[in-house]
Amino acid sequence: MLEFLEAGGWLMLPLLACSIVAIAIIAERFWSLRSKRIAPPELITQIWQWLRYNQVDEDRIRKLQKNSPLGRILAAGLQERNAAREITKESIEDIGRHVTAALERNLNTLGTIAAISPLIGLLGTVVGMIKVFATITVSGVGNPETLAGGISEALITTAAGLVVAIPSVIFYRYFRGKINRLVVNMEEQALQLIEILHGDRAFDPDEAKLP
């Protein structure tokens, strides 16, 4: 591994740093974006029970806020349960924007790594080829070992850049898609809560289940 890094030249260091950061972000997002952690399926049922038996109070709302991102959104609706429908909706939407931003944490960094890693690899290719041509200018083509070193540096950095970039792009798109699905699901449950609070519909347990 050390020989591989040395053969690729100094540009392998930023690529190594990018790979470490990308792995850390991917692991953290896998842990943080678990569906049951973001939107526990039993929450809307629990809230319905509170509403049915008139058990909604500030203590329960505070606990709900700490429960999960979906809990924060639904708690915002419960806090404005006696207000007009539009006020309840605005309160939920405001918290929803904050929750969505939290779900997307570090994804821009992962996307940046996916974008710049091939460019760093390309820069390594250019640097390696410059060394090759500089060697040819000074010594001619009679020293194949020196030429091979420059070409090797060029190819290794290009390959390393792609090795970092390809998984980063894949996981970036995967997490984007997962966040979109989670947000849609939370929006549906928030809308259901609004309609329940304002008497537009009865609670249906089947609709509260996560897909």
Image (cartoon, grey):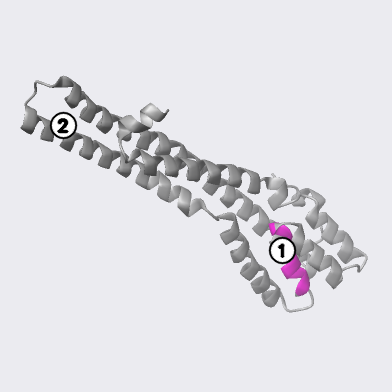
| Residues shaded magenta | 69-79
Closer to the camera in the image, 173 or 27: 27
Q: Return the residue nearer the eye: 51 or 99.
A: 99
Q: Amino acid at mark 1?
A: Arg
Local secondary structure at mark 2: helix
Mark 1 or mark 2: whose residue is earlier in sequence: 1
Numbered mark located on residue 149 in the image: none
* Residue under the image location 42 percent in, 37 percent down: 164
Where 129 falls versus 72 (above or below)?
Answer: above
Quadrant where the image shows the C terminus: top right
Q: Is residue 11 above or below residue 46?
A: above
Label drawn at residue 132: 2
| Residue drawn at 88 percent across, 60 percent down | 49
What is the residue that sits farthest to the right in this orientation? 53
Whether residue 128 is visible to the viewer of this picture, yes or no, is yes
Category of crowding for the residue at label 1, using alpha-carbon neighbours closer than 10 angstroms: few (below 14), some (14–19), many (at least 20): many
140 on left or right of 165? left
Instruction: Report the residue marked by disc 1.
Output: 72
Judge whether 56 appears above or below 84 on screen. above
